[in-house]
Amino acid sequence: MTLHLRTRLCGVIGDPIEHSLSPVMHNAAFRELGLDYAYFAFHVPKESLKPAILGVVGLGIVGLNVTIPHKLQVLRYLDHVDEEASRLGAVNTVINRDGRLYGCNTDGIGALRALEQNGVTVKGKRSTLMGAGGASRAIAFKLSEHVRSMTILNRTKSRAASLARSLRRYRNIEVKVKELTEENLSETLRETDILINATPIGMWPNVDVTPVRKELLPSGLTVFDIVYNPIQTRLLHDASKRGCRVIDGVDMLVHQGAPAFKLWTGREAPIEVMRKAVLRALKRKFGS
């Protein structure tokens, strides 16, 4: 990568952030299209979020992706948030337009496209979502346009209940809320078609941890883990052994990144280039 005074900068902020492969993915896309852009990962603790966002304008950064734990809190520092992200109460993409910061959320469409790309019919299905953070909210809203029912499980039940209330306000869908416990999972998974892990459980370096004990996973269940680092989490490994259909987080990473890429550059994202760049990086890291 050769940087110039005219190079336009993008990036991702989060805490932790060293696991992110967004720089690998977006920089590969910039190179493919011959764009003078560069993408970096910035470690931003919670207490530094406000000055970091103000710095986007001061430094002339074109745009940001936003990840854990900032997707909800970042809204208060933006000039405008689109309708969908406002309903969600979560932003994962920021665009700097002449010094004014605009927020939107591409996580939901990224998850839906990942499921569809892997041959999963979402319409009319019974879904279970683990987690109630920023990514969970976006996925819940997008899937609720299609699924028959949704159960939200979270360690803090009040956060799941808050998400459910938001869904019921905008969607005519059956939504249940439960604490994320083994007993509740056992009961819920017997009546689930699609299970989505939207928590960071199982993400590197905690690769031996899983949110669901293997014996609770019924054969025939679709298990989608949005964690992509590693590609095959402990949850997906166990689900595969149990005869489940498994979907890793790489496709969601790519499909949520593509709309952001277009917002920053005005160009269609080279999807396959982005996917291959992520897979190469993961194979180098994990040797498989």
Image (cartoon, rainbow, N blue to C red):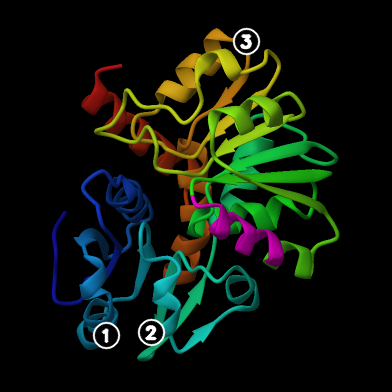
188 lies left or right of 96: right
The residue mark sitting in front, 2 or 1, is 2
Residue designated by label 3: 243
Residue 8 shows up from this direction: no
Q: Which residues are magenta?
A: 156-165
Q: Nearer the viewer, residue 234 or 265?
A: 234
Q: Name the disc covering residue 77, or none.
A: 2
SS for dot 1: helix
Is residue 234 or residue 161 the one in the foreground? 161
Question: What is the three-letter code of the residue carrying label 1?
Answer: Leu
For residue 141, the mark is: none
Return the disc, 3 or 1, that comes first in the chain's sequence: 1
Q: Split into 4 quadrants, where in the image is the C terminus?
A: top left
Q: Residue at x 46, y 45 (%)?
A: 253
Front-most of residues 181 and 114? 181
- For the N terminus, the quadrant is bottom left
Q: Is residue 56 magenta?
A: no
The residue drawn where x is 22% and y is 28% is 285
Mark 1 closeness class: few <14, some 14–19, many ≥20 residues within 10 Å: some
Amino acid type at mark 3: Gly
Tell whether label 1 touches label 3 (CB within 8 Å). Answer: no
What secondary structure do most residues of the magenta stretch adopt?
helix
Q: Which mark, residue 54?
A: 1
Residue 99 horizontal side relative to residue 177, left or right = left
Residue 175 horizontal side relative to residue 247, left or right: right
Give yes or no for contact between labels 2 and 1 (Cβ–Cβ under 8 Å): yes
Crowding at label 2, few (<14), some or many (≥20) Cα neighbours within 10 Å? Answer: some
Between the residue at mark 3 and the residue at mark 1, the CA separation in whole angstroms equals 49 Å
Residue 193, quarter of picture: top right
